[in-house]
Image: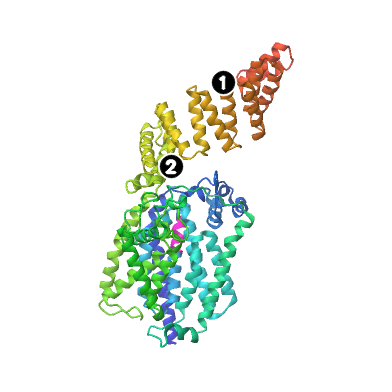
């Protein structure tokens, strides 16, 4: 009877704690529900074609790469995108609804974190575990994951990873195969949400290892590790789980490549110099600087930034103070965790969890685009918060390994926790407002990201979009000169940081030429884009267009030709080169290009118009008529073509002239 009372009290307390966590999640992130779309949301929801199809788009989502645009086709993360497609069925494309579900998923993650920690550490002070989850809930480093709809994939990866862990704990205790199958399925869903979940291959066995109190005890075991390995067969089961998860991870990692297009990812220095083999960014010093960055942001999460990359992370080597400090500190805490491992110390779990969860993002195993990023610290921060809670309890004299709270110290614990929670919460709530939309986020953060080439470029690109969007920064009937001048300022900063930034050079050249009316300077900027990347078709095309307007036809034709050879399926490249060839007095070359354009786009009227115009200039009236008539069939709203056809038919006395005369009257609004 006494046991039943304790169980009921525990259940009520767990329910209360769960309700508190849900309320806290919405208190912290409730103001994010007013936000719109922001950085990278186009990957999964904002304007994504498959999502706009609702349920009908799900098969396409399942059979498509995560990103698939010009020059890039990579990844496979269908789960988050499917959730947005389902949202679209009921609420269309509504960012406020999407933000609500992000906060709800965050709340579910908090509840699961508490539940799983309770199961792993069932003999530990429950108040300690709850405080750890409170600190985790309020930590501002999570604001990117919760506010960025694109990063719903991280929330889902963590959520399903926790469910997988919970399933494996049930299996290890009860030996029910249904729990094992459920754990594996949840792991698959976690992985297909985002590949961050791969770390659960090590986290789950480690948690199972800590779950059994008869394996590693708090007191030292005679014989140490060797004796434990001999006497505890359970360890073999843990290793089997790790092997099973490793096999499952390898299979699901390779599976998408069997039926999806080959992955292609264009690599840029401004994302991470290691991606292009820059020797000034050696692997291990960069890794320890990365660890230093995350530790610093976890201790004091301000300022936060939407993108880091080159040169926010400076050139480092083994003599860099941050690298030395990071090496000494992280080596020390790792050794401490391993020493404490036989005793099943909570700090050992927290530190190892932190290292395992952060390991894919240290730039050791693979160079990370952006080098560092707050979203990557989301799951690892749980380990940090466990350590932080441990320090608070130890300082106040609370017993952690017993569910006992000394009388008279509750108020001190509450005060200590509030001293951490309050600033965390204020920073989180304030940070949510920065994620209102693209421009708000970029304009706020750029002050802190002064050395990030990509941050400057992204901000400039958004300013350009706003400048040309009526009703935003754009002036009625024109563009915002203020936005354009600010964009130029940040593009210049981007190329100053990274002279190989082809996008920044190209945009800078286009704005300077087209809107600042500085043709010579604009052309020089475009030439720098081509120099930075000789296979950059858009820069060649813009340069060809500018040179054509400057009547430098020979150079113009060269760059149009280069653009066409790089992207042979781009219709416009053929049309503009054909036009400039004709202006150079090469009508036959122009006709060849127009004819080839017909094979690129069988529905376009423009190649037939070009052929007809050249036929007319050559005196081949009937051939001109034939091409113009085909063009008019494809574009029956073209008054000029209709007039030309009518003129020829009337000239040769063809009765069809009357039909085109009626069409001319219709197009001019006459009866």
Q: Quadrant of the C terminus?
A: top right
Q: Name above or below for residue 516 compared with residue 449.
A: above
Give the residue drawn at x 48%, y 27%. Answer: 546
Circle 2 or circle 1, nearest the eye? 2
| Residues shaded magenta | 100-108
Measured from the top left, where is residue 77 in percent x and y? 54, 56
- Can the viewer see residue 94? no
Give the residue drawn at x 54%, y 29%. Answer: 558
Res. 583 mark: 1
Q: Give the distance between the C-alpha atoms of the residues marked 2 and 1, in whole angstroms.
A: 34 Å
Q: Name above or below for residue 662 compared with residue 426.
A: above
Which residue is nearer to you in this view: 551 or 36?
Answer: 551
Label 2 secondary element? loop
The picture quadrant where one finds residue 326 is bottom left
Q: Name above or below for residue 663 compared with residue 25.
A: above
Q: Quadrant of the N terminus?
A: bottom left
Dot 1 alpha-carbon crowd within 10 angstroms: few under 14, some 14 to 19, many 20 or more: some
Q: Earlier in the sequence, mark 2 or mark 1?
A: 2
Q: Which residue is mark 2?
A: 500
Give the residue drawn at x 43%, y 42%. Answer: 500
Measured from the top left, where is residue 43 in percent x and y? 51, 49
Measured from the top left, where is residue 192 in percent x and y? 55, 60
Give the residue drawn at x 64%, y 20%. Answer: 614
Label 1 secondary element? helix
Residue 347 is one of the magenta-drawn residues: no
Measured from the top left, where is residue 613 in percent x and y? 63, 20
* Magenta stretch, main secondary structure class: helix
The picture quadrant where one finds residue 356 is bottom left
């Amino acid at each position: 009877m006494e046991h039943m009372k304790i169980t009921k009290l525990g259940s009520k307390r767990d329910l209360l704690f769960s309700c508190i966590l849900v309320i806290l999640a919405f208190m912290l992130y409730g103001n994010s529900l007013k936000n719109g779309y922001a950085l990278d949301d186009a990957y999964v929801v904002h304007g994504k074609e498959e999502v706009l199809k609702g349920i009908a788009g799900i098969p396409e989502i399942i059979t498509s790469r995560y990103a698939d645009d010009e020059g890039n086709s990579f990844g496979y993360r269908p789960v988050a995108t499917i959730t947005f497609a389902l949202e679209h069925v009921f609420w269309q494309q509504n960012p406020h609804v999407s933000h609500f579900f992000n906060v709800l998923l965050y709340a579910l993650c908090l509840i699961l974190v508490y539940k799983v920690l309770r199961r792993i550490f069932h003999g530990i002070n429950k108040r300690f575990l709850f405080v750890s989850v409170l600190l985790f809930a309020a930590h501002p480093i999570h604001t990117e994951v919760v506010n960025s709809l694109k990063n719903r994939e991280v929330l889902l990866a963590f959520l399903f990873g926790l469910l997988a862990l919970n399933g494996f704990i049930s299996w290890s205790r009860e030996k029910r195969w249904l729990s094992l199958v459920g754990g594996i399925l949840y792991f698959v869903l976690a992985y297909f949400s985002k590949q961050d979940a791969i770390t659960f291959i090590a986290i789950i066995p480690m948690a199972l290892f800590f779950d059994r109190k008869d394996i590693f005890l708090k007191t030292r075991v005679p014989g140490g590790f060797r004796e434990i390995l001999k006497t505890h067969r359970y360890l073999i089961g843990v290793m089997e789980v790790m092997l099973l998860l490793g096999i499952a991870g390898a299979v699901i990692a390779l599976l998408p490549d069997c039926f999806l297009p080959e992955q292609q990812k264009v690599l840029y220095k401004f994302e991470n110099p290691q991606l292009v083999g820059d020797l000034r960014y050696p692997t291990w010093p960069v890794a320890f600087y990365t660890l230093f960055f995350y530790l610093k942001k976890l201790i004091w999460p301000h300022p936060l930034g939407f993108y880091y990359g080159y040169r926010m992370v400076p050139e480092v080597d083994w003599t860099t103070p941050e690298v030395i400090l990071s090496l000494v500190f992280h080596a020390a805490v790792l050794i401490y965790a391993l020493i404490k491992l036989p005793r099943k110390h909570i700090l050992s779990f927290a530190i190892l969890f932190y290292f395992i969860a952060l390991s894919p993002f240290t730039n050791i195993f693979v160079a990370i685009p952006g080098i560092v990023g707050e979203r990557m610290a989301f799951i690892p921060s749980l380990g940090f918060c466990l350590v932080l809670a441990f320090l608070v309890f130890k300082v106040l004299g609370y017993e952690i390994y017993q569910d006992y709270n000394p009388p008279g110290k509750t108020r001190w614990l509450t005060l200590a926790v509030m001293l951490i929670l309050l600033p965390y919460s204020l920073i989180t709530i304030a940070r949510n407002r920065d994620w209102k939309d693209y421009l708000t986020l970029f304009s706020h953060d750029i002050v802190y990201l002064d050395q990030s080439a990509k941050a400057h470029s992204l901000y400039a690109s958004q300013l350009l979009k706003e400048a040309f969007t009526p009703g935003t920064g754009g002036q009625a009937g024109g563009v915002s000169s203020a936005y354009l001048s600010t964009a130029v300022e940040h593009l210049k900063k981007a190329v100053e940081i990274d002279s190989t930034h082809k996008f920044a050079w190209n945009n800078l050249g286009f704005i300077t030429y087209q809107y600042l009316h500085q043709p010579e300077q604009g052309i020089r900027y475009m030439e720098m884009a081509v120099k930075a990347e000789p296979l950059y078709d858009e820069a060649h095309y813009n340069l060809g267009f500018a040179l054509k307007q400057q009547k430098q036809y020979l150079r113009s034709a060269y760059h149009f030709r280069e653009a066409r050879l790089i992207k042979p399926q781009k219709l416009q490249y053929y049309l503009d080169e054909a036009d400039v060839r004709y202006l150079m007095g090469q009508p036959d070359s122009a006709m060849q290009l127009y004819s080839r354009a017909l094979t690129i786009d069988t529905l376009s009227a423009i190649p037939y118009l070009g052929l007809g115009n050249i036929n007319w200039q050559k005196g081949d009236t009937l051939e001109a008529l034939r091409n113009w008539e085909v063009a008019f069939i494809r574009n029956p709203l073209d008054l000029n073509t209709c007039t030309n056809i009518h003129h020829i038919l009337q000239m040769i006395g063809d009765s069809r002239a009357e039909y085109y005369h009626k069409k001319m009257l219709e197009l001019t609004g006459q009866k």
